[in-house]
Image (cartoon, rainbow, N blue to C red):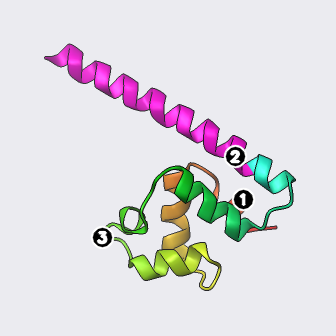
Amino acid sequence: MFSKIFQTIKLNKSFQEKTKSRNHAAFYGLKNLGFPLRKIRKTLIVLNNIKYSEIAGDETSVASISNTVNGIRASKTAKTLIAEKLGIEQTELWTQ
């Protein structure tokens, strides 16, 4: 029983590491091609099949996440949640 749990934890860690490096590759590739950060943020969320409600959780509203992704608003909480979910530094996702 414990071996299955440890195996699952190992697989989840491996998956998270691959997703993080995949997101970094996509982020820098799109950024180097000149895409705006707003579109890159939206693209990464779609590519990872993440719903705004999943990012928001109990921390903030879905509207706040949506507005922050689209650059309409600058919610610190939303920025932190989005950056954590994508595995990319917050400063990279919101600066040109």
**Which residue sits at x=57%, y=77%?**
68
In the rendered image of this protein, does residue 77 appear above or below residue 51? below
Residue type at mark 1 is: Glu
Residue type at mark 2 is: Ala
- Looking at marks 1 and 3 on the same chain, the residue that comes earlier in the sequence is marked by 3
Check if mark 1's residue and mark 3's residue have beta carbons within 8 Å: no
In the rendered image of this protein, does residue 7 appear above or below residue 54? above
Res. 52 image quadrant: bottom left
Q: Which residue appears farthest toward the bottom when viewing the image?
A: 72
- Looking at marks 2 and 3 on the same chain, the residue that comes earlier in the sequence is marked by 2
Relative placement, left or right, of 14 versus 58 is: right
Residue type at mark 3 is: Asp
Check if mark 1's residue and mark 2's residue have beta carbons within 8 Å: no
Q: Read off the residue under disc 1.
A: 92
In the rendered image of this protein, does residue 79 appear above or below residue 17? below
Check if mark 2's residue and mark 3's residue have beta carbons within 8 Å: no
Q: Does 18 appear in magenta?
A: yes
Task: Please tell me the numbered disc located at residue 37.
Answer: none
Q: Which residues are magenta?
A: 1-27
Q: Name the element at disc 3.
A: loop
Q: Nearer the viewer, mark 2 or mark 3?
A: 2
* 3D distance between C-alphas at marks 1 and 3: 25 Å
Q: Read off the residue under disc 3.
A: 58
The image shows residue 33 at horizontal and vertical percentages of 86, 54
Q: Read off the residue under disc 2.
A: 26
Q: Does 57 appear in magenta?
A: no
Which secondary structure is most common in the magenta stretch? Answer: helix
Q: Name the element at disc 2.
A: helix
